[in-house]
Image (cartoon, rainbow, N blue to C red):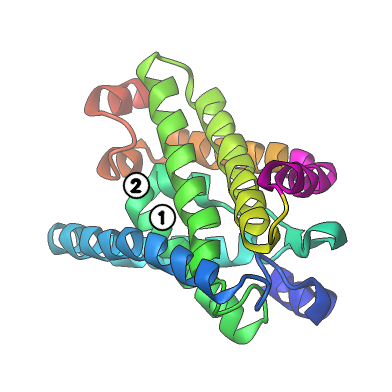
Amino acid sequence: MFFVAAGMFTVSDAQAMHISEGILPFNWAALWFAVAAPFVAAGLFQLAKRSKTDLSFKPLVGLMAAAIFIISCMPIPVPTAGTCSHPCGTGMSAILLGPWISVLVAAVALLIQALFLAHGGLSTWGANIVSMGVLGSFTGYAIFKVLRSVRINMAVAGFTAGLFADWATYAGTSAILASGIKGDAPFMPLFWKILISFMPTQLPLGILEGAMTAGMIVLLYKKRPDLLEKMHVITTGERQEAKG
């Protein structure tokens, strides 16, 4: 909770986290709500389905949502981009819960932040779900699965997934901002300006998030491989290898 309190006192209205309230025109804000909606709906469906066969699954999702909320409440202002850099945590949640439920977890964390901490906004909730939830979750999940399928070790796979989940989020944020505020100007020059403005903060934050993701996955692999098997992160054979 220290980081939540710190975020409350260090973020000003002018430098709200995520994509700020009101920065996107109505038509673009509505578009991103439409894009995000089916992913959130699929996450709710997956949550209901998995909770029927595993009573401990909902508490686990709640715990992960709290973790994502706290992780993404560590802002570093980026004045030239109209938003802030911060860790996301969606690579880790996607690996552990699956990408669809990870989108739902991100959506809940973003909504609470918008309502109570003035981080992001309600009008830009859909856009923030797409950048942090959808792009971050599916990028991290896909990279982890591909690397594990070719027998890359858990630490490297977790690090790479966390790293690129974070960077994909900010590439997406740059594209969403550029498309919404460019007016009649060309898209690509503005996109590159926004993306480059993120680099001084987001390049090291991505590395930090990769290390954090790898650390969590490796810790669970060594201490609780049964949980990773239960969450379909590893197979029964891999669990036996971890115990051996």
Circle 2/circle 1 CB separation < 8 Å: yes
Q: Secondary structure at mark 1?
A: helix
Rendered location of residue 22, percent (x, y):
65, 78
User: Does residue 244 appear left or right of residue 133 in this picture?
Assistant: left
Residue 215 visible? no
Q: Quadrant of the C terminus?
A: top left
Rendered location of residue 49, percent (x, y):
16, 60
Type of the residue with mark 1: Ser
* Residue with the most extreme left position: 53
Give the quarter of the image for residue 220: top left
Rendered location of residue 79, percent (x, y):
86, 62
User: Does residue 126 appear left or right of residue 74 in this picture?
Assistant: left
* Residue with the most extreme front position: 184
**Depth check: 163 or 234 in front?**
163
Position of residue 80 relative to residue 148, above or below, is below
**Depth check: 41 or 55 in front?**
41
- Please give the name of the residue rendered at 30% of the width and 66% of the height, measured from the top-left corner: 58
Q: Quadrant of the N terminus?
A: bottom right
Q: Secondary structure at mark 2?
A: loop
User: Does residue 87 appear left or right of residue 130 in this picture?
Assistant: right
- Please give the name of the residue rendered at 32% of the width and 31% of the height, measured from the top-left corner: 234
Type of the residue with mark 2: Gly
- Please give the name of the residue rendered at 37% of the width and 48% of the height, measured from the top-left corner: 99
* Residue with the most extreme top position: 150
Rendered location of residue 208, percent (x, y):
71, 41
Residue 149 visible? yes
The part of the chain drawn in magenta is 186-205
In the picture of the structure, the residue carrying the numbered disc 2 is: 98
In the picture of the structure, the residue carrying the numbered disc 1 is: 102
- Please give the name of the residue rendered at 42% of the width and 47% of the height, measured from the top-left corner: 94
Count neighbours of disc 1 (C-alpha within 10 A) and say few if under 14, some if 14 to 19, many if 20 or more: many
User: Does residue 91 appear left or right of residue 118 in this picture?
Assistant: left
